[in-house]
Image: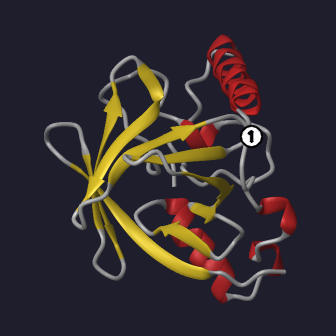
């Protein structure tokens, strides 16, 4: 089991439809969707960095910095996202899932510890990324075909349900943001 550095954040939906994310420790990001690409978020921060976060399938998030550097993360439920090899986990404190995850962790629930199964890939080939994109599109299509929009935007999900309710609001509705926009 890995005990990563925990970094909390809170999101604020702004009037222009973008999100202002404030991390504990002072980092701030301004996030917006990429038109025509509902699973891609553009961002820039108060330290001069910028890039995109792309939701691939299997809850994998690809972060690409402006210089082309890529890293991967995995949404593991309860508003938590594991980065790199588990050295840090971001926790969405503005979502029900994030607060619930903190509460459960505070109670010592062992299932919230990071295990090898939670770790994102270190690297991926373009073919592997494309396979996950197709998986994400199929999952989105099957969710839409079943008549649901993914629920009420619980960004955390339960980490192992197999349903994609954690991504509600990312189905092309430009006005709907979920509680958690890719880590």
Q: Residue at 72%, 56% (x, y): give it.
A: 122
The residue lying furthest to the top in this view is 145
Q: Disc 1 marks which residue?
A: 58
Q: Using the rendered image of the protein, determine whether residue 152 is visible from the camera's viewpoint.
A: no
In the displayed structure, would residue 138 be above or below residue 102?
A: above
Residue 14 rendering spot, x and y as whole percentages: 18, 47
Q: Quadrant of residue 104?
A: bottom right
The residue lying furthest to the front in this view is 67
Q: Secondary structure at mark 1?
A: loop
Residue 27 rendering spot, x and y as whole percentages: 30, 72
Q: Using the rendered image of the protein, determine whether residue 145 is visible from the camera's viewpoint.
A: yes
In the displayed structure, would residue 64 be above or below residue 49?
A: above
Q: Nearer the viewer, residue 66 or 54?
A: 66
Q: Residue at 61%, 64% (x, y): give it.
A: 83
Q: Quadrant of residue 24?
A: bottom left
Tell me if mark 1 has few (under 14), some (14-19) or many (20+) residues whose alpha carbon lies within 10 angstroms of its own.
some
Residue 74 rendering spot, x and y as whole percentages: 67, 54
Q: Nearer the viewer, residue 22 or 70?
A: 70
């Amino acid at each position: 089991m890995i005990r990563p550095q925990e970094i909390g954040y809170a999101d604020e939906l702004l009037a222009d439809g973008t999100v202002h994310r404030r991390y504990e420790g002072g980092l701030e990001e301004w996030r917006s969707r990429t038109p025509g690409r509902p699973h891609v978020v553009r961002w820039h921060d108060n330290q001069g960095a910028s890039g995109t976060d792309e939701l691939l399938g299997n809850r994998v998030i690809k972060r690409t910095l402006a210089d082309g550097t890529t890293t991967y993360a995995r949404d593991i439920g309860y508003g938590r996202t594991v980065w790199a090899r588990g050295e840090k986990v971001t926790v969405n404190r503005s979502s029900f899932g994030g607060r619930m995850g903190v509460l459960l962790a505070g109670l010592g629930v062992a299932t919230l510890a990071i295990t090898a199964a939670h770790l994102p890939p270190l690297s991926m080939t373009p073919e592997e990324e494309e396979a996950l994109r197709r998986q994400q599109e199929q999952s989105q299509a099957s969710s839409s075909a079943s008549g649901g929009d993914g629920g009420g935007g619980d960004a955390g999900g339960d980490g192992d349900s197999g349903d994609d309710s954690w991504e509600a609001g990312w189905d092309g509705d430009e006005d709907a943001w979920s509680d958690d926009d890719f880590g």
